[in-house]
Structure formats: structure tokens, C-alpha cells
Image: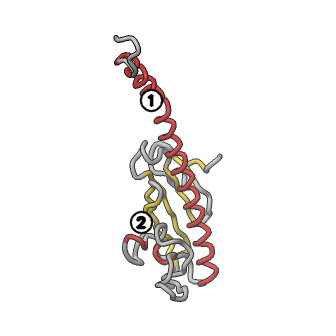
Amino acid sequence: MKRGARGFSLVELLIVIAIILIIAAIAIPNLLRSRIAANQASAVGSLRAINTAEGTYLTTFNDGYSATLGYLGPPASGGQPTFTAAGLLDDVLSGMATGGSTNDISSKSGYNFTYAPTNQDATSRYNGYWVTASPADYNVTGTDYYFSDESSVIRQDNTTTATASSTPLGG
């Protein structure tokens, strides 16, 4: 090289690129784990919101638990809450963002929520419900499955869809 030439040699540039790649290899898996943890925390928070909304629905309308997640969603713009649009959940979690008040499935923060009312009596009143939260893409958006019902206990399973017999969260 000429004396006084300025710039970097090819070896120096390759060393800098190798260092950047090593740092990226360390940082990206941690970023993905953080994202999964955030999605899982959001799923648990969403289940708590559904449980709270169901309790409010039960006491407000005195007609059992809701028939669908959509019933917990917001009323039409400017409308008053009714038993089919109680305004207790946002339109995303209630499934209204994807179409209509008959939804029993919704998606939020990398998790799919499935809802079902249970224990219908002779007066068509639902005396129970269950809801599950499953990762939309296992090991990418989440690694745990969750379940809750009218008991408001959130249960977790890390291998398959959680059920009423799964381990309680934190237990």
C-alpha cells in the first residue's frame, strides 16, 4: 500500500462484519424470547379481561354468561350497551374486528382465543363458559397454552392445549 493512503483494508472490513454478525447472533435469540414472553403475558392479561368481562356481564344483564365473545364487544358507534353488545371488551379481543357478533374465536398478540358457553339450562341461560389461548405459531409467538373458565382460575400447559385439569398458573 502507498504510504499515506487512507481507508480500510479488506481484512479490517471482514473483521468488523464478523464482529457485527457475532453480536447479532447473541442478540436476536434474546429478542425472540422477549417477544414470546410479552405475547404470553398479554395472553394471560387477555384471559383475565375475559373473566372480568364475563363476571360483569353475568351481574349486569342477569341472564347468565355470554353466548359468544362478540356479545362482550363494543356496541355500534354511539350506541348504548346491550346484552348482545355489552361494551366490556375491545373489538379485537371480542372478535368483532374480524366480523360480527357470533364470534367465539379471536386473535390478539400472537395468541388465538377460543370461547364456548357451557351448562345451558331450560331457560337458555348459560351457567358456565371456558376459554383457551393457544399460540398462533408455536415457538414463534408463544410456547404455553392457557385455559380458564367461570372459576376465573387460569391454567397452563406447555405441551398441548390446556384444559380444566391443567396446572393452575403459578401453581
Q: Earlier in the sequence, mark 1 or mark 2?
A: 1
Query: Could you classify mark 1 by the number of other residues whose Cα lies within 10 Å: few (under 14), some (14-19), or many (20 or more)?
Result: few
- Amino acid at circle 1: Ala
Based on the displayed image, in which of its 4 quarters is residue 101 positioned?
A: bottom left
Which residue has dot 1 on it? 25
Residue at left 46%, top 36%? Answer: 28
Query: Could you classify mark 2 by the number of other residues whose Cα lies within 10 Å: few (under 14), some (14-19), or many (20 or more)?
Result: many
Observer-nearest residue: 26 or 65? 26
Q: Nearer the viewer, mark 1 or mark 2?
A: 1
Q: Is residue 42 above or below residue 17?
A: below
- Amino acid at circle 2: Ile
Residue at left 41%, top 22%? Answer: 18
Which residue has dot 2 on it? 105
Image quarter hosting the N terminus: top left
Q: Is residue 1 above or below residue 26?
A: above
Query: What is the secondary structure assignment of the residue under circle 1?
Result: helix
Task: Kindly check if marks 1 and 2 are in contact, taking CB atoms under 8 A apart as contact.
Answer: no
Counting from the top left corner in percent of width and height, residue 166 is at 54, 49
Observer-nearest residue: 171 or 71? 71
Based on the displayed image, in which of its 4 quarters is residue 154 positioned?
A: bottom right
Count of marks overlaid on the render: 2
Counting from the top left corner in percent of width and height, residue 54 is at 58, 72
Q: Is residue 155 above or below residue 33?
A: below
